[in-house]
Every structure is written in structure tokens, then in C-alpha cells.
Amino acid sequence: MADKRDYYEVLGISKGASDDEIKHAYKSLARKYHPDLHPDDKEAESKMKEINEAYEVLSDSDKRQRYDQFGFAGVDPTYGQGQGGGYSGYSQGGFGGFGGFGDVGDIFESFFGGFGGSQRSNPNAPQKGQDIRASLTISFMEACKGTKKQVRVTRYESCPDCNGTGARAGTVPETCPDCHGSGTVKISQRTAFGVFQTTQACSRCGGKGRIIKSVCPKCQGQGRAKNVFTREVEIPAGIDDGQTLRVQGAGNCGANGGSYGDLNIKVSVRDGGIFERDGFDIRTEVPISFAQAALGDEITVPTIDGNVKYTVPAGTQTGTVFRLRGRGIQKLYRSDRGDQYVTVNVEVPRNLSRRQEELLREFDSSLEDRNQSGRKSFMDKIKDFWNS
């Protein structure tokens, strides 16, 4: 077995690979080396056997833990049998293969208490409750200005009848006499190396450290019960669509008097209509007439604070963008705001009367090619192109 390859190397993954990465690597290699898919490849069967062996260990959390800590000896009790180095002479009931003592994992468990089982935390210590989630939809203006909303969720709360103890009112849980409240018991085991102790969950109390003789009828001994919870939540100005708002202490109740978890609210923002959000800036479009664009005019621009006046200069072209400083959205938990960008679009009139058509043609014929702008006209640019 000297040429036995590392399981991580076999699958082509790193030691810290996730379960999904292990599964993906195995599937990829199985497609590549499976004997049924490659009948002409004589080495495919042996490679597939090696891949299966590696996957069997690394996909099992317990086996993987033993392998990471002790190598092949942690998952294969026969590893090292028949090899030199002083162990071969004890293959029958001696050290070689640990004959007569079962899986080598049992020996390691005797030494190390089940790989961390002896370090089990106190089952009666306060534990924080789990977080819960909710969703909330607000308007575009509420997102810009901030608002307050009532959020209604279902959560676990401490049972009011037993105050979270799980025992019927007037009684209290008793400390388990077997584990004395620790939730674990030590088991002595005699081996060829001597007497060793392992730590296991107490079977009498199920690892809880307490025994409830008279169960609370409301919560069935769980110490908590579901309840509909309503909370007023302050939505800060500037919150954006898809962001999550955390409300501390509004989640599920904790165990053994532990604190409540948190409430995570995913916020959805409705469409802003004429307003389009761009970060903390706002973009909007305002139509103006040809005369307003050519002569200039004072126009009305809608903002999230109401209508404001803006003077469009003479000669404004369609698509021109003007900037209104500080008219955007307030930045989260700050006092400053973004800007508003206004795009003006020149509207072309429709359904002209005969007189209006005559006046427009008369106006068009009165224009010079350069229109006194000092720039080349479109026709001048065409002539320059063909003459170049």
C-alpha cells in the first residue's frame, strides 16, 4: 500500500473542499473513467475503484474527519498489515491491523473520547434563538424619504404557561441523576492497552441534562410556542430594492433563557413611475416644445420634493441632460443626497393645420445653412465627405 494515493489527490480537490465540490469532482471523474462508458480502457476499472474509495470516505463527514486526522489508518483497519517496520510480527492480535479489537476508529475513540465528544458544551447553557425572515413592499417615495411599517410574522416565543422551562406550571425540571446535568456520561472500556473512557450522550435524558416528569400541556415540553408577532419597523431613507433590514431581537426565542434571534426583512420597492433610480441619483425625462428649445423658456420639473422651476437656455437640443444638485435620494444613514438628472426631449408637433404647415415651411426656408451658429451644416458635412 505504499503507492496508495491521497484521497484528495485522487479526486483532484483541496483539503478544504465543500461537500458540493466533492460531489462535483466525483461525477466528473465517473464520467471520465466509468468502465461501462469506456469498455476499451483496461485501466478504467482500477481508476474507478480508486475514485469510489476516495469518494466513499470524503463524502462521509465522520470518515472524512478521521481521515484528515489519522490518514488511511483512521478509515482502514487493515492499513499497514504485512509491511515492514516492526508491525508485521503482530498481525494476529497485535498491533498490525489491530487484530481482535475491531475497527481502528474504536481505538481512537477510546483515546480521544469520540473525536471531541468530551468537549461537549453544557446543554443547559443559554442559547441564542434562530433568525427569521420576512418580506416587505414599499413605494418608491417611501424608499426615498423613509417610513414606518407594521411587520407581522410568526415566531417562537417563550411559553407563557411554563416560562420556557417545558414543565407544567408549579413544577420544575429535575437534574438528570445519571449525568448530573452535564448531558453526557463516561463509559469505561477495557482494552489491551488498559482501561479507557469514552464520553457519550446520556441516554436517560437524551443529552439534555434535565428530566421533565410533568410536561407543560401548552408547549409539550418544548419551552416555546408559536405566536403571531407584530412589530413597527423604521425603514431608513435611501433603502434600495432587494436590500435586507435587520431588526435585532425580533426573531425566535432562545433556549434556556438565551436571547432572541434577529428578524431579517427583505425590502422590495415599487416602480418609481416618471422617476428612475440610479444609485442615490434620480433620472427623469421632461418634454418641451420646439419653440421652448429654440427660444429658451422656464419649465416645470418634477422632483421627489415637488415641482421646481428650471430655465432652459435658447438653442437646447433634444436629449440634453441637466443636473439638479441635491435633488436625488438621501444616502443611507447620512444627511447628504444624490442629484437628479433631467433629460429634455423636444416634441415634434402632429396634426398641423394648413396655416401651421405654411408657417413652418416659411420658417424653414428662412434658415441659413449654418443658422448663425458658426458650425458647419449637415449638408456642408456631406459635401466635405464626397470631396475628400
Image (spheres, rainbow, N blue to C red):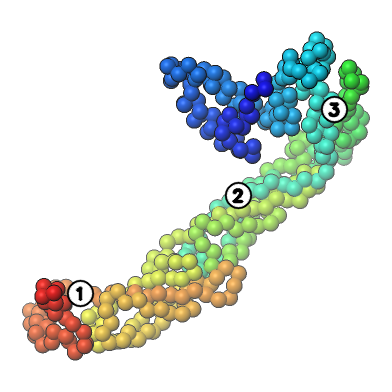
Instruction: Please state the horizontal and vertical placement of residue 366, each as a whole percent of the image.
Output: 10, 87
Q: Earlier in the sequence, mark 1 or mark 2?
A: 2
Quadrant of the rendered structure where residue 37 is? top left
Instruction: Please state the horizontal and vertical placement of residue 296, each as a whole percent of the image.
Output: 28, 87
Which residue does the numbered mark 2 point to in the structure image?
133
Query: Which element is circle 2 on?
Result: strand
Q: Earlier in the sequence, mark 3 or mark 1?
A: 3
Judged left or right of residue 45, residue 289 is left
Mark closer to the observer (3, 2) = 3
Which residue does the numbered mark 3 point to in the structure image?
111
Label 3 and label 2: CA atoms lie apart by 44 Å
The answer to whether the residues at label 3 and label 2 have Cβ atoms under 8 Å apart is: no
Label 1 and label 2: CA atoms lie apart by 51 Å
Instruction: Please state the horizontal and vertical placement of residue 112, each as a whole percent of the image.
Output: 83, 30
Say which amino acid is labelled 2. Arg
Quadrant of the rendered structure where residue 15 is? top right
Of the 4 image quadrants, the one containing the C terminus is: bottom left
Which residue does the numbered mark 1 point to in the structure image?
348
What number is the disc on residue 291?
A: none
